[in-house]
Each structure stands twice: as C-alpha cells, then as structure tokens.
Image: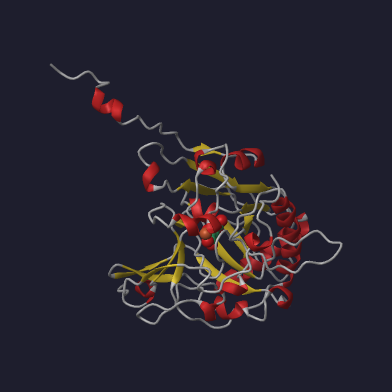
Amino acid sequence: MFRPPNSSDSQSKPQIIRHPPLTLVSPEFVAQHTPCTLHNAILPQELACRLFYTMLHLSQNWKRNKWWLFDRVVESPHRTAFFVRENMTETSDGSDPKEAAQWWYNGRQTEAPPSFPAPMEEACEIIERVVNEEMRKRKQYPLEWGGYPVKEGEEPLLWRANVAASNCYEGAKESVGFHTDQLTYLGPYPTIASLSLGVNRIFRLREVIPTDEKDNRSARTFNIPLRHNSLIIMHAPTQEVFKHCVPAQNTIDMFRPPLPPPADLLSEGSNARINITFRFYRPDFRSQLTPHCKCNVPCILRPDMKNRYESPPEDDEKTRGNADAGDGEGWAKRSLAARYWWTCYAGAQNDGHGCGYWKVMDVKAEGRGPFVGDITTMPIGQ
Ligand SMILES: O=C(O)CCC(=O)C(=O)O
Ligand SMILES: [Fe+2]
C-alpha cells in the first residue's frame, strides 16, 4: 500500500508556508514588513537634481570593487566611491573616520577619500533631520551608539552621518548582490540612510532565517521600488536580520530629470541610478581598534545572523538585542542573540587564502561603547 500523502512522517515536520515575493509600494507596507522606512520626495526637487548631476559627473571616475572569490578575482557589477564629511569633531571622540574610510575597498588600503561635495552636504543635513525624527518613534537596541552629545533644551541626537558610500548603476544589468553591510566601523545595530537618484530600481530584502527556525518558517523576498529622490532608512536590526541587494533587471525606464542639467554638466535622459548611503562610523570602532588576524590584516565584523553561537545566559542579558521581542512578522519576534564575530578578511584581497581567524566580539574586553544600553535600560519609543 502506498502511504497517504499526509503520513505521520510528513506530519511530524510541519509544512512550511512559502510566501511568494511581495512588492512593497508604499511607505506603510515597507514599515509593516521590514525594519526599514521609505520616504518619497525627500529633498527639494532642485537639490535632488543638482545632486544627481553632480554625482553622475563624478561617477565617471568611480571604481569597480575587486576581490578574491576562491581562486579568481571578481569585480563588482557597479561603480563605487567613498566620501568623508568635514567638521564632525563633536561626535568623533578625537578619532578620524578618514582613517577607517581608507579600508573601505575590501580591506585594501586606499588614498584618503574626498569630502562631501556641497549638494551632498545639503542633502545630508535634511536626511539627518528625517532619520532622527524617525528614530525617535522607534525602539533602540542596547548596543547602539550612545555617545552623541546631549545639548540642554534640545531633543536628544540619535544619529549623525560622518561618511557616505556612493554607487552608480549604469543600465538595467548593473547590480549589487545579496549582502549585509560590514559592521567593522559601523558597530552593532547601525542605521543607514540610503538615497536614490535617477532611474527607478528595485531594492530587495530577504531575511536570513536562524538555523533553529528553518524547519518552521521560510524567508520572504520583499521588493521595494526606489524612485528618484526617495530615501530608504535601514534601521536596526536590518543588518543583523536581512540581506539586501539591487538585482539586475530586464528593463528599466529612462530617467527624465524634472530639471535641465547645468550648462557645464552633460546628459538629457539617463539610464543610471545613483545611490548614496549615509553612515555613521563609530569612534569606538575606529580602525585603530580593529583586531588583526593571523595574516596581520584588519578583521571584519559580522553578525551571527543564523544564531549559531550559543552564548552563556549571563552575558546574554546585557547585550541581547530583542529580549522584549514582541508581535509582528517572524523577524520582529526573533530573539537576537547579539553575537558578532571578528573574522579574517585577507582572503578577499590577496590571493583568496585567508587564515580562518575567528573571534567572538567581546564589547567589555575590547572597551567598546558608550552604548545606548549604558544610558537607559528601557527601550525608548514604542
Ligand atoms: O544601491 C543601493 O540601494 C544599495 C547599495 C548597498 O547596498 C551598499 O552600498 O552597501
Ligand atoms: Fe549594502
């Protein structure tokens, strides 16, 4: 006799519901399903256009990132550049984000990066205000940076940008693969504000399911169309829980800028998308404090996205991200183990062979902080 389709075997393993990809077209849907927020028409139209033309012009000199994958060199399918913001001493603790920025390209040391061009600085000031407003409504995680200066009579500052990474995707086929942003200089639970200019492209998010949950649920793919002059803020814990990418597409619509270019800058229509991610390099994760591996190369910091590392319960209490994990989607219910690893990165830059060095980050022993959790034990906001 054949076993009926719903045998006791298949019953012991519950059927996982596999949801089809979901396109999130509105800010409400993005907020409902992901730890990100979407803000359309973020900059005044004139500034968005001026910044687009400025960056498109500069992008002619941007480089493709190169790294070793197994035994061959691969090249990023887009061009990229890095910028450092001037006059950030009040939040930098005497450390210089320029130093860290020199390690941006896959652990290869590069020349000191340029400063923000004028329209990028203007945009950054607007974006900082929006990010702070948004963060005030959200809960904070104990390991977030708690060292912003407090000014009497003013709302507490929750985020600043001191660096920016910019990407140019020319045509439908240029892309960036699924990844999480390296936490080496950002530290745990970073907030990253990502501005889109030019053609509309899809930004894709997908949760990394912890090993112990993978028999119970599957990850859903979320597609978020990013229009010219939109901002997506990757709030905590996006980098700990989701991977993101900008996939190659079969077709894209030409971008017809609402305002003409200045006389000295080219182009009428364009098939390029410019992305600028504004970030805060934490003083307590400055490059001088990055552990080195056995190859004597600075390590990279990665979250334990799959909750593979079982930590002693006593030190879990303090660093746990989501001890009060509540309702909502699967990811929002996750209890984050808050484990991070320093790992060898030499394999990406030299000959594809690293030393396999691996160490759990120990915030106390490494002297990191101050953290949000040092100042307040209660999550603020919701
Ligand atoms: O272009 C984008 O929207 C994403 C870029 C990105 O993920 C990155 O630079 O790390
Ligand atoms: Fe990224």
Ligand 1, seen in the image, is in the quarter at bottom right
Residue drawn at (67%, 76%), measured in percent from left and top?
92
Q: Is residue 87 left or right of residue 210?
A: right
Quarter of the view holding residue 19: top left
Residue at the image position 49 percent from the left and 76 percent from the top: 290
State how the image is colored: secondary structure
Task: Decide if residue 189 is in sight here.
Answer: yes
Q: How many marks?
A: 0
The residue drawn where x is 34% and y is 30% is 14
Quadrant containing the N terminus in the rendered view = top left
On the image, the x and y values in percent for residue 159 come to 69, 62
* Residue 244 visible, this orientation: no
In the rendered image, the residue lying farthest to the right is 153
Give the left or right position of residue 155, taking residue 105 as reference: right
Task: Identify the residue at the far left of this view.
Answer: 1
On the image, which quarter does residue 275 sit in? bottom right
- The front one of 134 and 363 is 363
Residue that extends furthest to the top in the rendered view of this protein: 1
- How far across and how far down the image is residue 61, in percent? 55, 74
Q: Position of residue 200 (x, y in %)?
A: 59, 49
* Vertical side of 230 occupied by 111: above or below: below
Q: Nearer the viewer, residue 219 or 261?
A: 219
Pick the quarter of the image with the C terminus: top right
Q: Position of residue 112 (x, y in %)?
A: 58, 82
Work out whether residue 6 or residue 150 is closer to the camera in this orientation and state it: 150
Of the pair 116 and 298, the residue shown nearer to us: 298
